[in-house]
Each structure stands twice: as C-alpha cells, then as structure tokens.
C-alpha cells in the first residue's frame, strides 16, 4: 500500500525497513511478502522522474574521464531500472573465488530471479575451444517502477512511502533503532527490527560514509566503505569479417548447441575460458561481436586485400553467396578491485546538506592486457579455422594511445562482501560488520565484478538476503 502521511506510522515498528526501491529493494520486499512479513519501502523519489532530483546525484569525478553520473542514475520508484536496457547474464563460478559465498548459493534463486525479471530465455555457457567460451544475454522487459507499482499498491504487507529521503541512522550498542527521513518539509523517525540499505552502487557508499561521519561510535572506523569501486569499461576493440557458414559448420562439428542466427540476433558473445585466464593471468572480458551486412568498399576490406590477397580472392566468392558479414567488436570488461578506485564524500552538498559523491577512478593496465590477449585468441581461432579475420585497435598495443570507454552504467563495489572488517563492509549474509540489524544489498556488495551484467546477480543476492531475514522470524525472541 502507499503511505502518504508518515505521521500515521511513526509509532509503528516494522519488521523490515528497506531504503531504496530499485531492483534490489523491490526484490527483497516481494520475497518477504510471500512470508507475510511487513516491510516499509522508503523511496527518495516520486513515481516518475523529476529533473530536480538530479541535484542529489551529482558526482565529482577525479582521475580518468567518467562522464556525468547524474544522467545514468534515477531517483524515482524503481530506481535506475527506469533506464535499464534489460540485458541479463549470471556471474560465472570462478568470479566467486574470493567471495565468502559460492555461485551455488545464488544458483538456487535462478528460477525466482528469472520470474521477477520475466526472463523467457535460458542462460547458456558453452566451450568454443580450450581458450574461449560462448554465452548469451537474456533480455528482460521489466521496468521495476512500472511493473510492480500496482502490485505494491494492493499489497497488505509492502508499504511504500515516496518522496521520503533517508537522512541518518539512530542506534547504540551495535543495533540500529530507527532512521531519520524527510518527507515534504517535515522530518520523521521510523522504527524497525531490521534495516536494509538498497540505494544503488554509489549511493550505498555515500550514505554509509555520511552515517559514519554522523556517528563514528556506531560504525567501525576500520570498515573500507567506498573502497574497491568497480565498473565495466566498455569500448571498441576491433573490426573484421566472418564467414557465417563456416562458423556454423564449426559449431556442428563440435556439437555446440547454441549458435547465432543472424536473422534473429546479430550478436555473438565470447569470453575467456578458465584455462586461458589461469595460463595468461588475466581478468575476463565479454567480447561483443556484432554482425552487419558487408560493404566491399569498406577500408578494412581494401587493407585486407593487401595483407591476405588469397583470402580476399576466396572471400569475394563467398560474399556473392551471402555467407560473409562484417563485424564490429566491443568489450565489456571485468575490472580489478583496488583500494585506489573509491567513493568519498565531496565538499559540495546536496539540497539537504548531505555531502555529494567524490569518485576517484582510473583505468588499469590489466584491462588492456586482458582485452588484447582474448582478442588475439579470437583472431587466431578465426585464422586457424578459416572463419574470418580481425583488425585490432591500436590502443590494445600502445599505452600512449588514448581510448574512450562508456563508463558508469554498471556501478559495483564500495560496500564489498567479505569475512572481516579489514577488507570488507558486509559479511556473507550482507550484514554490516559490527552491527546486528543493518544490511546492504545491491551491486555495491560485489567483491569482484566479472564481466556479466549485474542485475540478475543483484536480484539473486536480494532474494537470499530476504531468506536470511525470514529465518529470524522463527526464533522466539522475534
């Protein structure tokens, strides 16, 4: 149900208060609702986006170019899913090597997460050869704000308060007793047994940094809040040509089930195998190979005719048979978690006098090394099997060549999961170290980023958190 007047619930003690109504917050609330657990969702924005809300999302970026983050985050019901393109894929099991949980701990939520995201396509991961895998992206048409508003409006167990901005936590002796928030021109104190911070990959860190500044006795000074920030650098790495018929023949020979159908899906997705990652000591990348109709006058075709004239002679016969496609190649890269990439509080203030975000971020040499090695493996595979040819971008070989990345769409880290407060903020159950009843969910808890789109993993983690809280319900003291 929608709560318009917080005065009516100020003396009520909820079982759970969730701060933020994006995919993480809504997924958690939906799971708790199944067990008839009363939840209050606090959303700083309105049902629809208001331009003035961007004043709360400004980021002062230091380091490499990052772009304006107020343009790819939303302060509204449903969160940034209002901008979301819908792509989903799960993280691989080797992405969890340093996590206190395993992939299997999240896999049990695959069906529930797929249902929440209305995913019709099943995920696959198949071996292309010893060095490379192929995988897919499943597409979700869900916009959490639009698709779950009516459900929550009718719910007896999920209460939603819009235009209600979190201000601070209140508590002592390792327990949060209440939160302060502002709705309209009035401040309110709201009580609960458990509290979940679910405001996104950057806001979670900003609000926790502010909370520790306000009460350093409640939050440990050792917690690395804001550190190990990551995102997925996305950039152009090459182009080429590919013989679609020969590629499909190779798929048939290797009994690969999931082959690209160009007329339905013009993309092929490739990543490094675990063997290649270990042999070359690299981090992974999602390689996006985009098919398009060939143009004989393309500069790349002209250049290739000088380098590989025999290949081009044969190529023209295949072009006439409509088996050849041009390809553009982009990479969505994993990024190493390092302390130096971090979120801090800015000297500038938002309209409620809470410090805005200062983001310190830079590209890392390991990213270029990894992209180059994976792209070379794809190129070698094309040549060995006479499937095609690739031309790689200069910045993969010359560190002096600048390259632009699409930055900030996937914001991860800052409140990372781990086993102790020296190098993590939350434990295996997403509870903040040193506190008994404050949890964090969303991509900010990611310990490593992998190259996968994060939303599916966010929903899995949020469902698992809800189940952890549900367990408390069976204890006598609750």
Image (cartoon, rainbow, N blue to C red):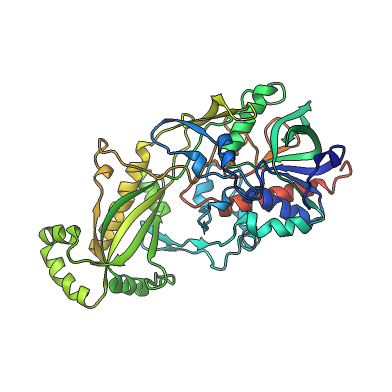
Q: Residue 383 in the image: state x and y as whole percent.
A: 23, 62
Image: 39 above or below 59: below
18 displayed left or right of 92: right
Residue at 72% over, 49% down? 466
Position of 337 compared to 242: left or right? right
Q: Residue furthest bottom?
A: 321
141 or 350: which is nearer to us? 350
Q: Position of residue 362 (x, y in %)?
A: 40, 33
Q: Quadrant of the C terminus?
A: top right
Q: Is residue 309 left or right of residue 247?
A: left
Q: Is residue 415 visible?
A: no
Above or below 245: residue 183: above
Task: Looking at this view, name the residue that lies furthest to the right.
Answer: 476
**Who is closer to the viewer here, 349 or 96?**
349
Q: In the rendered view, does 312 fall on the left or right side of 251?
A: left
Q: Nearer the viewer, residue 375 or 305?
A: 305
Camera-side residue: 103 or 286? 286
Residue 235: give x, y in percent of width and height.
36, 48
Q: Residue at x 48, y 52 (%)?
A: 452
Examine the rendered structure and indicate whether residue 230 appears above or below residue 274.
above
Residue 295: where, in percent of width, then height?
A: 22, 66
Q: Quadrant of residue 335 in the image?
A: top left
């Amino acid at each position: 149900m929608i709560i318009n007047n917080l005065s009516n619930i100020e003396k009520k003690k909820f079982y759970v208060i969730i701060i933020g109504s994006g995919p993480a917050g809504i997924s958690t609330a939906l799971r708790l609702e199944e067990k008839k657990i009363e939840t209050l969702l606090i959303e700083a924005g309105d049902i629809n986006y208001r331009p003035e809300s961007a004043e709360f999302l400004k980021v002062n970026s230091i380091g490499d170019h990052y772009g304006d983050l107020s343009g790819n985050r939303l302060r509204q019901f449903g969160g940034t899913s209002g901008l979301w393109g819908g792509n989903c894929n799960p993280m691989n099991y080797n992405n969890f090597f340093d996590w206190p949980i395993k992939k299997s701990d999240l896999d049990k939520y695959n069906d529930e997460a797929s249902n929440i995201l209305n995913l019709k396509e099943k995920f696959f991961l198949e071996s292309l050869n010893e060095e490379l895998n192929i995988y897919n992206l499943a597409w979700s048409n869900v916009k959490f704000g639009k698709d779950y508003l009516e459900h929550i409006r009718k719910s007896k167990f999920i209460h939603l308060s819009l235009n209600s901005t979190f201000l601070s936590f209140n508590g002592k002796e390792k327990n949060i007793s209440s939160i302060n928030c502002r709705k309209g021109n009035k401040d309110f104190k709201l009580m609960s047994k458990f509290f979940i911070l679910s405001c996104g990959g950057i806001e979670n860190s900003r609000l926790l940094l502010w909370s520790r500044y306000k009460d350093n006795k409640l939050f440990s000074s050792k917690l690395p809040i804001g550190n190990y920030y990551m995102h997925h650098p996305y950039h152009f790495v090459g182009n080429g040509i590919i013989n679609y018929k020969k590629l499909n023949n190779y798929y048939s020979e290797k009994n690969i089930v999931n082959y690209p159908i160009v007329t339905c899906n013009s993309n092929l997705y490739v990543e490094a195998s675990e063997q290649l990652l270990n042999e070359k000591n690299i981090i992974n990348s999602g390689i996006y190979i985009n098919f398009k109709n060939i143009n004989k006058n393309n500069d790349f075709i002209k250049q290739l005719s000088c380098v590989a004239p025999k290949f081009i002679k044969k190529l023209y016969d295949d072009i006439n048979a409509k088996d050849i496609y041009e390809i553009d190649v982009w990479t969505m890269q994993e990024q190493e978690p390092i302390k130096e990439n971090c979120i801090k509080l800015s000297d500038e203030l938002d309209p409620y006098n809470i410090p805005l975000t200062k983001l310190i971020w830079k590209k890392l040499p390991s990213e270029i090394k990894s992209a180059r090695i994976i792209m070379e493996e794809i190129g070698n595979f094309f040549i060995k099997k006479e499937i095609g040819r690739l031309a790689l971008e200069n910045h993969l070989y010359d560190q002096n060549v600048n390259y632009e990345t699409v930055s900030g769409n996937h914001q991860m880290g800052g409140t990372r999961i781990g086993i102790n407060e020296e190098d993590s903020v939350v434990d295996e159950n997403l509870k903040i170290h040193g506190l008994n009843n404050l949890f964090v969910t969303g991509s900010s808890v990611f310990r490593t980023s992998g190259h996968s789109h994060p939303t599916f993993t966010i929903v899995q983690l949020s469902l698992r958190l809800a189940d952890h809280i549900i367990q408390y319900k069976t204890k006598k003291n609750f």
